[in-house]
Amino acid sequence: MASVVIIEDDQRIRQLVTRVLAGKGYEVDGAGTALDGLQRIVQTAPDVVVLDMGLPDLDGTELLKMIRAVTDVPVIVATARSEDRDVIKTLDAGADDYLVKPFSVEQLEARLRAVLRRSAAESSTPQIIVGDLRIDPSARVASLEGVPLQLSPKEFDLLVYLAERLDVVVSKRQLMAEVWRQPYGGSEKTVDVHISWLRKKLGETAANSKYLETVYGVGIKLVDPA
């Protein structure tokens, strides 16, 4: 069974989640502070991290950036922060899923299973080549005409999602549900912003598109310029 590091300063919650997940066969390690949690991640290389944002020594967003600097381990954020801006900021910083407190351990376990399935699928995903664009989902790197693209985690996720559906029109609502993991809420404006950023890094504009083609009133698709 998978190994999990839980970074949560509330001892009652940490012990409850640890006990239930351990009873289901997970190997669970807990930490009550950001720095202790980071040390455990580096030392044990877990399969998944569950991260609270309100930690006593460091804000969870800063810890998430530190985690992303050393590993691509899936991170599920479990927090009381429910504002759209907090969700978007956290997902853009590299979180793989977002769970708002209060939640049941059963719901958390379902999220764990989901990110583990995605992680297993990505580990065996071949490279995607579209024109001069080359994407390696497993290594999380992309290049255009041999030049590496400096993409944020969500820009990369967006690019992979579209590339895996070459020539298929995808709606903003679908992108919010599948890329941002917000099937029942969230502003679609964040999709527009990320598409704009991605266009710029691909060397194109909405008026002069090459890879990202907008189908007005429907959505967007990735196409082969050739």
Image (cartoon, rainbow, N blue to C red):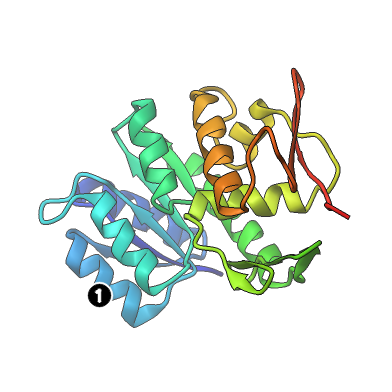
Among all residues in the image, which is located at the extreme right?
Answer: 226
Quarter of the image with the C terminus is: bottom right
Q: What residue is drawn where x is 36% and y is 51%?
A: 17
Q: Where residue 123 appears, x then y in whole percent?
A: 66, 71
Q: Is residue 104 above or below residue 32?
A: above
Quarter of the image with the N terminus is: bottom right
Q: Is residue 215 above or below residue 17?
A: above
Q: Please indicate whether residue 88 sits to the left or right of residue 142 in the image.
A: left
Q: What residue is drawn where x is 32% and y is 57%?
A: 64
Q: Which residue is mark 1?
A: 39
Quadrant of the rendered structure where residue 38 is? bottom left
Q: Where residue 208 appears, x then y in whole percent?
A: 70, 38
Q: Nearer the viewer, residue 188 or 83?
A: 188
Q: What residue is drawn where x is 64% and y is 40%?
A: 178
Quadrant of the rendered structure where residue 67 is? bottom left
Q: Where residue 134 appears, x then y in whole percent?
A: 71, 67
Q: Is residue 182 above or below residue 74?
A: above
Q: Is residue 169 above or below residue 50?
A: above
Local secondary structure at mark 1: helix
Among all residues in the image, which is located at the extreme left?
Answer: 57
